[in-house]
Image (tube, rainbow, N blue to C red):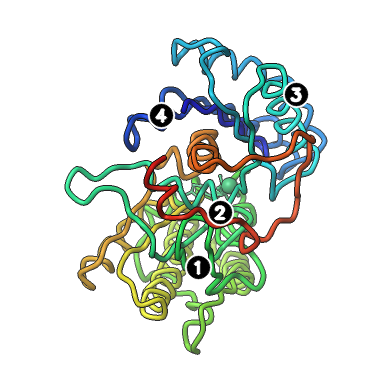
């Protein structure tokens, strides 16, 4: 089944084609992402109305480009998947409208995909030559600009929330911390790049909520600690790098401690990491070390599939469409959507897709 995937939940227009007849990453026939970062930069954050309008401008040309890259015409498609939520309602509606219209005109099955399920399943596209793709049960750490969650994945579609942030998401904390030290939007990746030049231990911030049991997170206090340190410093480039390093170490260590606890709680040794912050090099290295120490395994998507993209939506949608699931023909989105309400994909269906 060759499935077109469309992602428009926030400020990235993503389009991809995934072919279920090919294993793992080989199934990804083409994918393209257009980032609106430059459009929103002068406002210091995403402006929802501008995001919707830019998706309208970019989506159809990107669908054409992706089909051309895969050397396919619309007639070669077998299904359409699109992000139906969570996300910005106007932005979601652009993707849903185009996806549903294409499916209706071509008489194809279509399905609305949960954005976080897309992130969560993206690492399953990678196939380790020896170990193969990770299979449930496993623990997923979802770390993006909007979410920080630990989820027990009991089957594809059966997700049990183990813990989540009580305030800022990890990516949001990266972005806000970067902003308060004068870095341009979106600051997360820039703060991470700066941290490489910082001296470890020059600044030490707390590891929030690691001193008590539980799997929830809180990052907003950390941001305040950084603000106080920055304001009380000489604000030189070297100090900015040292503080960035201290902040990154605090976030990464906190995430690693909670991941280890979540693996203990779930009684398994496979950790899957997804979402934009999953592109962070120090997080990847620290979680690899933790998994090696425990004799377990940690799986990441390639960095470009950590941030928002159409490939993860094509892949997650293809699994569900190949298992026979369908949405109805309405253009309908769910800006707030609990992952626990998703239908479970039977192991038999997932294996045969
Ligand atoms: O998953 P994503 O593309 O969008 C959401 O669904 O939110 O994640 C974007 C978030 C942003 O907050 C961005 O700053 C953060 O991921 N991010 C990073 C890195 N790359 C992206 N944070 C830390 N280090 C990075 N290398
Ligand atoms: Zn995302």
Q: Residue at label 3?
A: 56
Residues at circles 3 and 4 in contact by the CB criterion of under 8 Å: no
Q: Is residue 187 visible?
A: no
Q: Position of residue 149 (x, y in %)?
A: 55, 65
Name the side, left or right, on which 282 lies relative to 55.
left
Question: Is label 1 or label 2 in front?
Answer: 1
Residues at circles 3 and 1 in contact by the CB criterion of under 8 Å: no
Q: Which one is earlier in the sequence, the residue at label 2 or at label 3?
A: 3
Q: Residue at label 1?
A: 150
Residue name at image x 61 percent, y 31 percent = 6
Q: Secondary structure at mark 1?
A: strand
Q: Position of residue 217 (x, y in %)?
A: 56, 74
Q: Residue at label 4?
A: 28
Cα–Cα gap, marks 3 and 1? 34 Å
Between 216 and 324, the one nearer to me in the picture? 324
**Marking on residue 54:** none
Name the side, left or right, on which 270 lies relative to 13.
left
Question: In the current view of this chain or complex, which residue is farthest to the left?
Answer: 130
Name the side, left or right, on which 11 lies relative to 318.
right
Q: Secondary structure at mark 4?
A: strand
Residue name at image x 44 percent, y 10 percent = 71
Q: Which one is earlier in the sequence, the residue at label 1 or at label 2?
A: 2
Q: Which one is earlier in the sequence, the residue at label 4 or at label 1?
A: 4
Q: Is residue 264 visible?
A: yes
Cα–Cα gap, marks 1 and 2? 12 Å
Q: Which one is earlier in the sequence, the residue at label 3 or at label 4?
A: 4
Cα–Cα gap, marks 2 and 3? 24 Å
Residue name at image x 50 percent, y 45 percent = 190
Q: Residue at label 2?
A: 144
Q: Quadrant of residue 59?
A: top right
Cα–Cα gap, marks 3 and 4? 24 Å
Cβ of mark 2 under 8 Å from ligand 1: the answer is yes
């Amino acid at each position: 089944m060759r499935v077109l995937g469309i992602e428009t939940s926030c400020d990235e227009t993503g389009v991809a084609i995934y072919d279920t007849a090919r294993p793992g990453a080989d199934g990804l026939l083409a994918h393209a992402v257009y980032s609106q970062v430059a459009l929103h930069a002068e406002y210091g954050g995403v402006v929802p109305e501008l995001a919707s309008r830019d998706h309208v401008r970019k989506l159809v040309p990107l669908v054409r480009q992706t089909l051309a890259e895969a050397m396919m015409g619309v007639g070669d498609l077998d299904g359409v998947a699109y992000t139906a939520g969570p996300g910005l309602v106007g932005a979601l509606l652009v993707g849903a409208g185009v996806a549903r219209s294409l499916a209706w005109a071509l008489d194809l099955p279509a399905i609305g995909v949960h954005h976080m399920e897309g992130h969560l399943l993206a690492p399953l596209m990678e196939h380790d030559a020896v170990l193969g793709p990770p299979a449930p049960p496993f623990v997923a750490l979802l770390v993006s600009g909007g979410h920080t969650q630990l989820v027990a994945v009991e089957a594809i579609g059966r997700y049990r929330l183990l813990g989540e942030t009580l305030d800022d998401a990890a990516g949001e904390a990266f972005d806000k911390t970067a902003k308060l030290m004068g870095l341009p939007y979106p600051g997360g990746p820039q703060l991470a790049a700066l941290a490489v030049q910082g001296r470890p231990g020059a600044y030490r911030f707390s590891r929030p909520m690691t001193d008590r049991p539980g799997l929830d997170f809180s990052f907003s206090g950390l941001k305040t600690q950084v603000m106080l340190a920055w304001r009380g410093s000489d604000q030189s480039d070297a100090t900015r790098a040292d503080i960035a390093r201290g902040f990154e170490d605090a976030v990464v260590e906190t995430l690693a401690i909670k991941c280890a606890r979540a693996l203990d709680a779930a009684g398994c040794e496979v950790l899957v990491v997804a979402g934009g912050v999953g592109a962070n090099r120090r997080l990847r290295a620290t979680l690899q070390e933790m998994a090696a120490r425990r004799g377990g395994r940690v799986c990441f998507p390639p960095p470009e599939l950590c941030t928002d993209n159409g490939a993860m939506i094509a892949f997650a949608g293809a699994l569900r469409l190949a298992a026979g699931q369908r949405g109805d023909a309405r253009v309908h989105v769910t800006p707030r959507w609990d992952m626990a309400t998703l239908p479970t994909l039977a192991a038999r269906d997932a294996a045969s897709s």
